[in-house]
Amino acid sequence: MALKIVKGSIDRMFDKNLQDLVRGIRNHKEDEAKYISTCIDEIKQELKQDNIAVKANAVCKLTYLQMLGYDVSWAAFNIVEVMSSSKFTYKRIGYLAASQCFHEGTDVIMLTTNQIRKDLSSPNQYDTGVALTGLSCFVTPDLARDLANDIMTLMSHTKPYIRKKAVLIMYKVFLKYPESLRPAFPRLKEKLEDPDPGVQSAAVNVICELARRNPKNYLSLAPLFFKLMTSSTNNWVLIKIIKLFGALTPLEPRLGKKLIEPLTNLIHSTSAMSLLYECVNTVIAVLISLSSGMPNHSASIQLCVQKLRILIEDSDQNLKYLGLLAMSKILKTHPKSVQSHKDLILQCLDDKDESIRLRALDLLYGMVSKKNLMEIVKKLMLHVDKAEGTTYRDELLTKIIDICSQSNYQYITNFEWYISILVELTRLEGTRHGHLIASQMLDVAIRVKAIRGFAVAQMATLLDNAHLLTGNTQRNGICEVLYAAAWICGEFSEHLEDPMQTLEAMLRPKVATLPGHIQAVYVQNAAKLFATVLQKHEGETDSQAAQETSQLLIDRLPLFVQSANLEVQERASCILQLVKYIQKLQQKNVEVAEEVTALFAGELNPVAPKAQKKVPIPEGLDLDAWINEPPSESESEDEKPKVVFAKEEPKHYRSRHTEVDEKELARRREVRKQEQANNPFYIKASPSSQKVYDAPGVEHIPVVQIDLSVPLKVPGMPMSDQYLKLEEERRQKEKAERKKKEKKKKREKRGKGRKADSGPESEEDITPAHQVDIVTEEMPENALPSDDDDKDPNDPHKALDIDLDNLLSGFSSRPLADSEKLPVRTHRPEVLKSPAEDRDSKSVPQETKKKSSKEKKEKKKDKEKDRKRSKEEKKKKKKHKEVEEELLESQPEEAVQSEETKEAAAPPTSTSAEASDLDFWLSSAPVPPAAAQEVTAPSSAAAVDTSSAAAPESEPDEPKDTEPEDTKSSKHKKKKQKKEKEEKEKKKKKRHHHHHHHGDAGGEDSVQNGTVEEEEPLPPMSNYSLLAENSYIKMVYDIQGNHQDESKVVVSVIFENKSDSFLKSMEFNVLDSLNSKLQRPEGAGPHDGLTVPFQLPPGVSNEARFVFSVQSIVMPQKLKGTLTFIVKSDESSTHEKLDFKLHFTCTSYLITTPCYSDAYAKLLESGDLKGSSLRLEGINMPFHHLLARICFHHHFSVVERIDSCASMYSRSIQGHHVCLLVKTSDQTVSIDAKCDEPSLLGNVLDEIKQTFSKC
Amino acid sequence: MIKAILIFNNHGKPRMSKFYEHYTEDTEQQIIRETFHLVSKRDENVCNFLEGGLLIGGSENKLIYRHYATLYFVFCVDSSESELGILDLIQVFVETLDKCFENVCELDLIFHLDKVHNILAEMVMGGMVLETNMSEIITQVEAQGKMEKSETLTLLFICQSMRQSQASRFSSKIS
């Protein structure tokens, strides 16, 4: 029997899977917690088992419990165990659990690095997928750093399923490890044009997310996105791109102009509401960015507003909501177009859906004018009455105040009306915005001098009827207005008709039930009133009244002296003593009024909220410096002083310093805010800041019905409605008067046609009822210029504000530095498509070489462009339609343009060309061919140059490059011209051929060392040399060392499809030698070829990278290889092959490594190096060109340069140092070289010699 | 970015929660409660968007939800997502669940939380939309399901034999 029970329990223990657990929980509704705790005990037992299946089951259950809110972090290690199972089923369970409960603080996470790396490179795509998905949830900075390179490799995986996940996760990697952004960006950009729509969408997703935070860095991608936008049919992608454009347009108004048309087309054509809505949104953003609107923009606005109206009128509440949301954006810049839909918006105020009502309220904010403010507010007040006791009513209240107070009470013509509105709002029982009303009262009374008399009268009545406001609850939010009322009555007591009565009202015993801070104001202002009363009675012979007042104070104040509130107590006792003293004086018939009033003399001016910030810090004041030395923190617990008495002291100090923790600070800040809010002298200008007052928790206060049988409508206190009538009457009167005047005028000069006096009143016609002088806020005299609101320093996206343009355009001087490259683990063989950094180092030379040649041109071009632009503008003004046509035309032109660039140049180069083309692209009118040429030439020339240098026979093919059938003859002509130019350029290049120079790091270093490099522009150079070509395909290649791995070099091959057919299934194979081997993926045989990870449409080129391992690097090598591929045309497909020879020079094993002169000297002194030398005759290029050539072609960097002598340094992938001393005199160059490997040195020198003999 | 995806029933019981930012378990529960509170008090025929609760970013984030029979599907997103797009995505999600579970109901989600997660993982990754094409999602889910099945068959066998051996060890100890 016992056996049976035990066996049963064991069975159950193993049997209980997720379903059983869920069922169990559902069956134990009464004691769920208890049941779960026993389950957790069971799970703990299961996790102790060796069996991975049992563990996985347990972890699966934990995932469920985690969702129910149980902390399962104690099982983190077991989760890692399950993750590392070889079975996909368990691995997935493990990763799921990890993604649900791992975070940066999880310490076992560092154990996962290798496991994840293994999974990422798993041959099973779902293992990789699961690892990527999991990693996306718990990636830490460490993981991101260690795995960035692996993930980047996956971005070019053959399976789109992996590619898209890898692309997407890069965003998370960037966030955690911002250094990876620059090296990874080119490839990410490449993925924008991935053949798989999913991958493309992922890339768009990531770039949009990046660009949203730092839009300016991504402006250069605009042409590419534009192309995608006009070509893509995927609504998701379109929406993302369109949203991105919305973020970009504020930075580049010209972009907006270009966008309007395709967006308008989309608006007209799309049936997807989501797309339509985003288009409208972006058009709005564009229109906002184009402040000086062209006339045809009003059409766009009309279109938007019209479409939005359709949305708002739709029965679908979602569309209605979004329509209102978008409308509010238009409102900011084009209020007039929205105002015509006032009817619709007011209608939405009655909608049953609260979110829609709120959005409609937002819109009202911008729809008011001087003319309709009163009317709209009246409507809102009606809603306020209807919406008793809801949060919506509070929202209404704040909106009313927002609307009225916006832009410095711009629309208020009658402040008496506004004050009475505020007073009416005080009737709202249970609102939590008492603060808001109070601050408005204070603000108006202080800043509008003319209204003070009226305001004081109103406030006095409020104070008199205070019992209505306070009701029974003393913590009622609305009683805050009493604070304002008391202060206003006190401060401006000279306007009071009967100060004595108000004083009496303020000293009623009931006041003691008010919150402390209000009582304090009461007491203080009672004293002010007292002073006023004294002043009034001073002249009178009968001092009875004055003495009565003193007596009143002396009678009433003791109540406050007993107050529990310190502030009240202090003020009360102080004032009590003062009054007692005054009474004594009064009895002696001494005149005291003058002196008492002096206590409160002086005008209080409002101070701008930022005033304090703007006070410049005096020189020499360091607020962070310690005044007294802080107690030393280093003192540890163990080193307690031995003296018994001193024991207490240090502890005490420490606690005092550490106790001010975050919470405490936050609390203090809150208190300070509260204080400021209550401080009438601290005025907040913007309505938004007023929301700070929202006291949380006030809403829980029970709502007490106001006793309406005693109406607030006190005789002599006009209601706001009356003002509406009064105002209308007044306006009528004014209008009539104006008419009269006009008539008079007209009578005077009859000849001059009619004036449109019958039209509607315009804004300016309405004059304020009384002169309002809004006192401006005070600022310190030497206020600093306005500072922008600082960004949140904790924003993780701040770190991603990385300039990417210089990766793309050749202009900038910041190519990827070695330190920026991604760390690569050396123990893992790199499979195909190579590490990231070589791609970058590849693009570096391409960039820099352009930089130099463009540096000078750039300035010229800028000037030219400016001129062009101004010309264009003139043109535009003249002939609007024409420009529009041109705009249309320029777009297809664009496509041709970029394609051409691509044809001619390798991908990295075309990238940069596109980037530098941004300006060109944006200047939408067609550019004279010459100018266009100037922009594209350098980039295309770069690649053309290479090919022409290495393979002159390829040249005749060039102009034949696939031309899309152009129908427009003008375009055709232009293109031809361009071609011609290009060829000319090419020839020029040839002539120039002897002037190749400049290098990547070399350029940087030499500048660093003070040499002037800008003496003469450096012509572009390329290291790419021809590998092989036939009528279908051309391959150029470059070899770069990989400095993280001493036995690997990366060969980048650019494949260019020269045919009209589609090239696919390309396989790259090399016959390995003993010394050099192509790195093949795991599982592949030693003679298998590598699939090139892309296909080539006609005329397109793309780059692939292959990793080779080398053993000895001292000798140059040649490897034979074959490329096989399928040529697919419409009718047929044929198998083709192309043989080639890869030449590994010794140079390609060298890596540009910067070296400092002292280290260099030490190296030479060490004597480990063996020397050799070389003489070159008949070199007639400038010395710095020569250096640049060595730097660029042979991967050296300049250590130091003195006149015509320079020392250079490079390092091989296996760590050999190579030092050169280059001297020149009269066309003779002598190179003394030292290296710790003589044969390597000999070969390198031979190669250098060859380079120069070629020139 | 999608900040969180929550599924809970009409009583606020969580059926699935996926947070793309880290919160403690307690906060997560509070967020679910808060969201439920916000969403459940809304009428059936009002709009499907509302401002996020205070715990999950406040007004910077939007809650976009759909209510199906007994379940609420809530996506908490920031301003970079298109509201209508997400609404469509929820539809895709639910339809995918429906296909994968064959007439999905609340009980399916309750008993197969892991499967729901796996389906979701094919749609949304790390808070970003990965795939919106339903057939593609289903293909991938099914392919993985197949893999799992082939693995579990062999495992079942191993498991069983192991359990027997353990049980016999226990019984020998007792006897």
Image: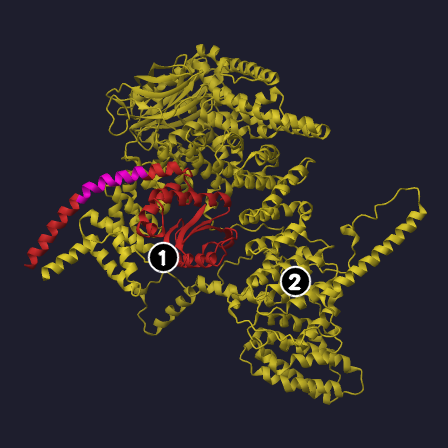
Residue at 80% across / 61% down in the picture?
A729
Tags 2 and 1 touching, CB below 8 Å: no
Disc nearest the viewer among 2 and 1? 2
Residue marked by disc 1: B25
Q: Is residue A842 left or right of residue A858?
A: left
Q: Is residue A174 left or right of residue A443?
A: left
* For residue A870, above or below residue A900: below
In the picture, the quarter occupied by the N terminus of chain A is: bottom left
From which residue to which does the magenta span run?
A: B142-156
Q: Chain under label 2?
A: A
Query: Residue A974's spot in the image, x, y percent?
Result: 59, 17
Q: Secondary structure at mark 2?
A: helix
Q: Chain under label 1?
A: B
* For residue A906, above or below residue A648: above
Instruction: Depth check: give the residue in front, A16 or A201.
Output: A16
**Res A305 quadrant in image:** top right
What letter labels the chain drawn in yellow? A
Is residue A143 visible in the rendered image? The answer is no
- Identify the colour of chain B in the image: red
**Marks 2 and 1, how far apart at CA:** 45 Å
Residue marked by disc 2: A382
Q: Secondary structure at mark 1?
A: helix
Residue at 48% across / 65% down in the picture?
A667
> Is residue B145 rendered magenta in the image?
yes
